[in-house]
Image: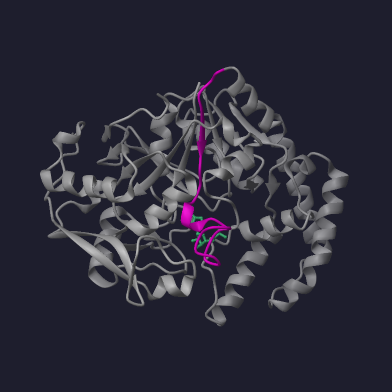
Amino acid sequence: MSVVIVVGAQWGDEGKGKVVDLFTERANVVVRYGGGANAGHTLVIDGKKLVTHLVPSGVCHPGKSCVLGDGMVIDPHTLLEEIADCQSKGLLARGELLIGLGAHVILPYHKLIDGLREDHGAKRGKSIGTTRRGIGPAYEMKAARRGVRMRDLLRFDRLRDLVTANLDDLAPVITHLGGTVPTASEIAKWIDEAAAAGERLRKHTGDAGRHVANAIAKGEHVLFEGAQGCLLDLDHGTYPYVTSSSTIAAGACQSAGIGPTQIDSVVGITKAYATRVGEGPFPTELHGAEGERLRQAGGEFGATTGRPRRCGWLDLPALRMGARLSGMQSLALTKLDVLANLPEVKVCVAYRLDGKELDEPPTDPDDIARAEPVYTKFPGWGKLPSDARDFTDLPATARAYVDTIERMAGVPFCLVSVGPDRSETIRLRDPFA
Ligand code: IMP
């Protein structure tokens, strides 16, 4: 039996989808544990593309149990579309999906508030750059104990009372933000649509926490799939430029309702360079042609919003922080191929701030923005063989780059990805072993 958490080590979009898909070969249960449809995982299987926002990336292995944990915020309409898309591709054919009844639900007014706040903030140069998927407002209402949960979708009277009370609370906020308060008939339509979606999802709902605990007790392999990345964590990330959930490994226990003593291993995923979407400090960001080259080569456009991602060199202080926050025991390196054919590759090994060298980012976002990256340079390595399956198949300079990251991050690699396809992978260690 092994329980493994896979977590993004940077600001999200590290290529977790591919890694979770690979690790799922050995797992019985795959659990998505945080966030909602703000995430977007692009999977390429036999050249065919599947984008998931809510359903765990392990879905591509028929017969595995896919769980949406109680710590998530779920847009029921998006989930229904995603289930239909998976089923049209022959996946989830046996309905192997379980949605925690305690997960919170995202309804149209959460998205309305998210968008209004972003527009309002933008006018003052203070937006977060959210995905506008209603994530923040849904978690706010959860913390205020006014949220709507999956279980409430299945009880019409409760759903109606909760939504009506929510909109009473929110009407002055909507007006203040320059929005239009929904009419009674719009609200009634939202309630009816949510109830109908709940009915369609009913057969997939249940006690996700017990399901996961029972699987662990039976000695099955359980894989927790993190969303976003450690530096977007609500408590420990680059606040306020973060998401509203716990993205670090500890969030897996919180969401699924299992104890930390059940976890055997934590794997962090890092890209061979860095990206960030939305606002917030990013010391190694490349502007102009260099950034554009990485963006095009890496296809760095949001799977959820289509927004161009900000691109830069790999940031070891940020990676060290992610590794510390999640207690990573191994790392998976993705998209090494994107750095092919560059004249020179750089990696930030420290920050310089007010005359001092720092091995991790300072705690204040303004200080992170002021920090100057200290770089180590590598000569480019030309083409990377996509049929590399052994570490020694890589060019010497690429190996030196990977070795330096491993040594300076202080965490060994378990996998190096050299292309988007499942097969384009160098496997070094089995996290379930
Ligand atoms: P929210 O999660 O939509 O509230 O967005 C908050 C911040 O997290 C914004 O900077 C988003 O761009 C970022 N974010 C949310 N989800 C993801 C993701 O899956 N990948 C990368 N960034 C994300």
Q: Residue furthest top?
A: 218
The region drawn magenta spans: 219-243
Asked whether residue 251 is in view, the answer is: yes
Residue 131: image location, x then y, percent = 53, 60
Q: How many marks?
A: 0
Q: Answer left or right for 201 relative to 90.
A: right
Residue shown at the point (57%, 40%) measured from the top left:
252
Is 375 on the left-hand or right-hand side of 362? left
Residue farthest along the front direction in this orientation: 356
- Judging depth in this view, the residue of 421 and 186 nearest the camera is 421
Residue at 25% across / 47% down in the picture?
336
Q: Which of the 4 image quadrants contains residue 425?
A: top left
* Residue 331 placement (x, y as % from top left): 36, 41
Q: Is residue 93 magenta?
A: no
Of 274 and 327, the residue lying toward us: 327
| Magenta residues, dominant SS class | loop
Residue 353, above or below 237: below
Where residue 68 sits in the image (x, y, percent)? 61, 38
Residue 371, above or below 143: below
Q: Residue at x 53, y 20 (%)?
A: 220
